[in-house]
Image (tube, grey):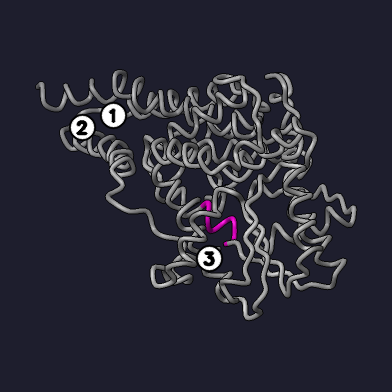
C-alpha cells in the first residue's frame, strides 16, 4: 500500500450519508482493493444478510456457561443491541456502509480486505482489563440504557463524524472506562493501521468508523510506533492480584475451618451442618424462583447451593441457569428482538434476559445466605462456642 494512494473514509455505522459516501468514492476512484472494518465472522453474517439468508439458529447457552463466556456473550449481545436500537430509530441497518462497500466492490470486481480484529478477541481483552469499578459502571450503564434512564436527546449521527465532537466523545469514554478505551480504540487503531499497511496493492480505499480514522492516520504517518499485530491478537490474562476471588475463596475456607475446629473441640456440629444445608438450599431456591425461574430450575439451584458455597469455583446460578436454558431455548431472534424492547414486559419475555435473571437471582440468594444468614445463624455461634468456652 502506498500512503499517497490511500483514501480513508470515516463513517458512522448507522448513517445513510455514510453509505452514499462510501459507494461514490469506490465508483469514482475504482481502487485496487477496498479494505473494510470487519472481521471474518461479521463479514460472513453481512454476506448472508445480503443474500437474504435469515438464520435463527439455537444458541448453546450450556456451552457458553461451561466455557465461562457469559460476560463475553452478554457484552457482545448488548453492543449489538445498542447499535440495532440506534439503527432502528434512524431507519438504517447497522453495517449498511459496509454493505455498500461490499456491493460496490463486487459490482466493479474489486477484491475486499478484512482488516478488523476478531470481535471475540477484542471484547475478551477489554473484559480482562476492566476493574471492578469499570465493570460496575458498565452494568449500570446497560441497565440505564435499556430502561431509558439518562439523556433523552435525539442523536445526530452525522454530527458524531465531526472531528471536534469525536474528540469530546472519545475523551468522555476514556474518563469513564480507560481500560476499555485502550482496547476498543487505541489497540484497534493500531491493528487496523497495521492490516492496511500489509495490503500489497498500491491504491486502497479503507472504510472504517470515524472514531478510528485519526488514530489510523497517526500510525500510518509514524509506522515505527506500530506494535506487533500478533501481540494484539493474544487474549491477555487478567492483570494484578485477583483480590475479589481471593476473598470469595476465603469465606468457604473459613466455614470449613470453623466446622473442623468445632468437631475437634468435641462440639456436636450435626445440627449446625443441617442448618447450613437447609438455609443454603432454601435461599438458593428462593433466589431462583423469585427471579422467575421454572420450579425445576429453582429446585436444582437449591440442591447445589450447599456444595457451591463450599466450592469457590462453582456458582449455584450456573446450574439453575443451565436447567432454565433447557426450557427456554435461546435463538438468534432473541438477540435481534432486543432492539425492539420498549418496556419491562418486552424484556421479561426475552429468553436471554430470563435466563440471565435466573443465574443472577440464584447467586444473589446464595450470596445472602453466605454473607448474612449463615454467619449469624451457624458460624458465629459455633465460633463463640469454640473460643468462648
> Mark 2 or mark 1: which comes first in sequence?
2
Q: Tell me if residue 119 is in the magenta stretch.
A: yes
**Number of marks in picture:** 3
Most foreground residue, 273 or 61: 61
Residue picked out by circle 2: 262
Query: Viewed as shown, does residue 251 lie left or right of 112?
Result: left
Most foreground residue, 6 or 266: 6
Up/down of 192 relative to 353, above or below? below
Residue picked out by circle 3: 193
> Mark 1 or mark 3: which comes first in sequence?
3
Q: CA distance from mark 2 to mark 1?
A: 7 Å
Q: CA distance from mark 1 to mark 3?
A: 65 Å
Residue drawn 46% across and 48% down?
Answer: 127
Up/down of 264 relative to 184, above or below? above
> Mark 2 or mark 3: which comes first in sequence?
3
Please state the extent of the stretch shown in magenta in the rendering: 117-123
Disc 1 vs disc 3: Cβ atoms closer than 8 Å?
A: no
Q: Give x and y (percent) for residue 74.
A: 59, 41
Up/down of 241 relative to 191, above or below? above
Q: Can residue 314 be seen here?
A: yes
Label 3 neighbour load within 10 Å: few <14, some 14-19, many 20+: many
Query: Viewed as shown, does residue 152 lie left or right of 375?
Result: right
Q: Give x and y (percent) for residue 355.
A: 64, 34
Image quadrant for the C terminus? top left
Most foreground residue, 153 or 147: 153
Residue picked out by circle 1: 269
Q: Secondary structure at mark 1?
A: loop
Query: Viewed as shown, does residue 163 lie left or right of 354?
Result: left
Q: Give x and y (percent) for residue 230.
A: 47, 72
Image quadrant for the N terminus? bottom right
Magenta stretch, main secondary structure, is: helix
Amino acid at each position: 500500500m502506498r500512503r499517497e494512494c490511500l483514501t480513508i473514509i470515516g463513517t458512522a455505522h448507522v448513517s445513510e450519508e455514510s453509505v452514499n459516501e462510501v459507494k461514490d468514492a469506490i465508483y469514482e476512484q475504482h481502487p485496487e482493493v477496498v479494505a473494510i472494518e470487519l472481521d471474518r465472522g461479521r463479514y460472513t453474517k453481512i454476506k448472508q444478510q445480503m443474500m437474504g439468508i435469515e438464520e435463527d439458529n439455537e444458541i448453546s447457552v450450556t456451552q457458553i456457561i461451561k466455557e465461562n463466556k457469559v460476560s463475553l456473550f452478554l457484552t457482545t449481545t448488548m453492543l449489538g443491541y445498542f447499535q440495532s436500537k440506534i439503527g432502528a430509530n434512524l431507519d438504517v441497518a447497522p453495517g449498511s456502509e459496509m454493505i455498500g462497500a461490499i456491493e460496490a466492490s463486487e459490482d466493479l470486481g474489486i477484491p475486499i480486505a478484512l482488516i478488523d480484529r476478531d470481535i471475540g478477541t477484542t471484547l475478551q481483552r477489554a473484559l480482562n482489563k476492566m476493574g471492578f469499578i469499570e465493570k460496575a459502571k458498565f452494568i449500570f450503564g446497560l441497565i440505564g440504557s435499556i430502561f431509558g434512564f439518562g439523556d433523552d436527546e435525539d442523536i445526530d449521527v452525522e454530527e458524531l463524524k465531526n472531528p471536534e465532537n469525536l474528540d469530546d466523545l472519545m475523551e468522555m469514554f476514556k474518563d469513564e472506562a480507560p481500560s476499555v478505551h485502550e482496547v476498543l480504540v487505541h489497540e484497534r487503531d493500531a491493528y487496523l493501521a497495521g492490516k492496511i499497511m500489509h495490503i500489497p496493492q498500491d491504491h486502497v480505499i479503507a472504510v472504517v468508523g470515524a472514531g478510528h480514522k485519526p488514530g489510523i492516520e497517526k500510525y500510518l504517518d509514524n509506522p515505527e510506533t506500530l506494535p506487533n499485530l500478533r501481540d494484539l491478537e493474544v487474549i491477555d490474562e487478567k492483570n494484578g492480584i485477583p483480590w475479589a476471588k481471593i476473598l470469595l475463596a476465603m469465606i468457604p475456607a473459613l466455614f470449613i475451618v470453623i466446622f473442623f475446629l468445632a468437631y475437634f473441640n468435641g462440639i456436636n456440629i450435626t445440627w449446625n451442618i443441617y442448618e447450613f444445608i437447609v438455609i443454603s438450599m432454601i435461599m438458593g431456591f428462593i433466589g431462583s424462583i423469585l427471579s422467575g425461574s421454572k420450579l425445576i430450575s429453582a429446585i436444582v439451584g437449591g440442591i447445589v447451593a450447599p456444595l457451591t458455597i463450599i466450592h469457590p469455583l462453582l456458582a449455584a446460578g450456573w446450574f439453575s441457569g443451565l436447567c432454565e436454558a433447557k426450557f427456554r431455548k435461546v435463538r438468534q431472534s432473541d438477540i435481534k428482538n432486543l432492539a425492539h424492547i420498549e418496556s419491562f414486559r418486552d424484556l421479561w419475555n426475552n429468553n436471554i434476559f430470563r435466563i440471565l435473571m435466573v443465574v443472577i437471582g440464584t447467586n444473589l440468594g446464595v450470596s445472602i445466605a453466605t454473607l448474612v444468614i449463615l454467619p449469624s445463624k451457624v458460624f458465629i455461634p459455633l465460633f463463640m462456642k469454640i473460643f468462648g468456652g
